[in-house]
Image: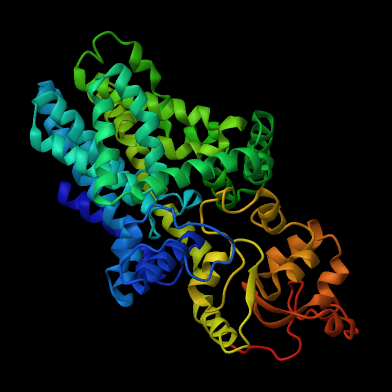
Amino acid sequence: MIYFLVTASFLLRALPRLRLRNSLASDTYFHLYCAAAIREHSFRLPDRLPRIILPHRYSYPFLYHYLLACLPMKFRLWAERLTGAFFDTLSLVFIYVFSEWGVLQMGDIRLRSLPIVVAALFAFSPALMRIYSGPRAYNGSPRTVGQTLYLLHILSAYYALKTNSLIGLAISLSVGASLVVTAKFGNQVLVFFGAFFVVWVSYQYALLLLGCFLLALLFTKGHAWSVVKGQVKHSIFYFKNLQRVFLFPYTGSFGSWVQRGSEELGRLIRTGNLEAFLRWFYGERYYLHLLLTVYPQFLLLFYLFIPGVLSDPLEQFLLIWMAAGFIWFVFTKTRPLLFLGEGERYLEFALFPSLFLSARYLIGTWEIVLYVFLGYSLFSSLYSLRQYHESFAPLDRDFERKKALYGNLNQQKPGLIFPLGSFHWQVLYHAQFPVLTYGGNMDESLLSKDEFLLVYGQYPYPSGDFRRIVDRYNVSYIVSDHAHLKHYRTNIVERPEEFDQRVEVIGEIPSLVIGRILSKNESGKQSTTLMETATYKGPFSKRGGPLRT
């Protein structure tokens, strides 16, 4: 059975990318670009990322980028496509092996089926397969790598604590050190969850954490310190300046969630449109809704109060782990702590203990609930495949046309490119010209707050003073798409008519627009604005000498 689950886990995550090979997400472009930069830098970590204009340091966790850089481009692209499938499946193997060992330690013959049940729940978990949180399972990202490393780190630490195993300790120490330079969110989990383990499991875990950071510093010749320092500085800046612009407007209320749910349920009853209801059901991001639809096992709290259920040390350890994830999930759904990342990611890191404890109680008691949960998880996984294809097939279809547009852009007169919206990593990956953006982590000692807010004052959009930006930095080209350009022109830019006159679109498809910035003399000769000459349903059109796909 475990071989079937391993195969199913891998294929469910791999098949979408085997079918849509070029459906690259924005962050995926960043990781591939960083890998290319490391390879071009003779496999030494660059202090700065090439062609990024604003002052910065390359302080992002680099291990995933370095591993990609070791592969030739053809194999690097395949590694990106299969990262989520490989590491989620590797996590499944670790979970199964540890669960087998744990059940033997507990000595309860009634729990013989528990390891395979937990593995099945993990393989099909809607928390890992949904596309609205990444999509983590289908695109190359250090996020899945970090979750696997953390899982191996903490399981090995507990094994070492209970058996005095030096091998377990060495694995936990080395894997924890690797995590420090692999994933930003994994670093936060190391520290935030670690506080719970130090207080309620063993003070020795504090020494283990310290050893992980020291080992990371030793083996990276101090570069791990730049990673930690860069993350802290960026978090402080995000707290002070970005979250009120980028996150506050999207925090919903309980009342609005109830209203949306009532409307969708009423529409389902009136029209019978199940597809529309499912899109809302799986796409709603309000945190209580996520507990109901994606992490229902966290709601099985009643077993905590049943005498004898959590008497085993392993169960108590898993409960503390689960509580750490849940508490940080709740904390980071409050406005002051939104900058610490999507709260549901903390639940992802606590997924194994939540599944183990809930299944451990349901086996032999309410097994019908367990079967329903398994069926629901399998349905959700299959539905996620459909959602992924519908959402990302356009990216795959447009990929070659985008390459052609960027290829023609690279034949133009060299100049600075300014992305409008979340296009900076895509531009850096495809284009050869310098780009007006920053290097991933914001550092006020390198880039002042005022300069950052001028260029990204409506993050991920620029401030409304478009004329000042293009004149100050001598911008030659802009890159965006119809939707982002419409939003920027309609809601942000201070002088829309001047914006129309200064931008000449030289190549476009609906998902990519490349424009040339005209000088003041050139723009004054224009008799019509871009908005008046649109040929697409979107707001912009080709003018001048179009780049053909």
Residue 267 x %, y %: 67, 44
Of 376 and 456, nearer the camera is 456
Query: What is the quadrant of residue 100 in the picture?
Result: top left
Of 278 and 347, nearer the camera is 347
Is 457 placed left or right of 129 in the picture? right
Residue 359 x %, y %: 28, 29
Q: Residue furthest top?
A: 307
Of 138 and 7, nearer the camera is 138
Query: What is the quadrant of residue 326 in the picture?
Result: top left
Residue 293 x %, y %: 47, 37
Image height of 213 relative to 484, above or below: above
Is 130 placed left or right of 198 in the picture? right
Residue 230 x %, y %: 47, 47
Is 66 placed left or right of 364 in the picture? right
> Is residue 20 visible from the viewing direction of this image?
yes
The residue at the point 86 percent across, 83 percent down is 521
The residue at the point 73 percent across, 84 percent down is 542
Image height of 478 relative to 256, above or below: below
Q: How is the image coloured?
A: rainbow
The residue at the point 27 percent across, 39 percent down is 214
Is 463 placed left or right of 188 in the picture? right
The residue at the point 41 percent across, 48 percent down is 226
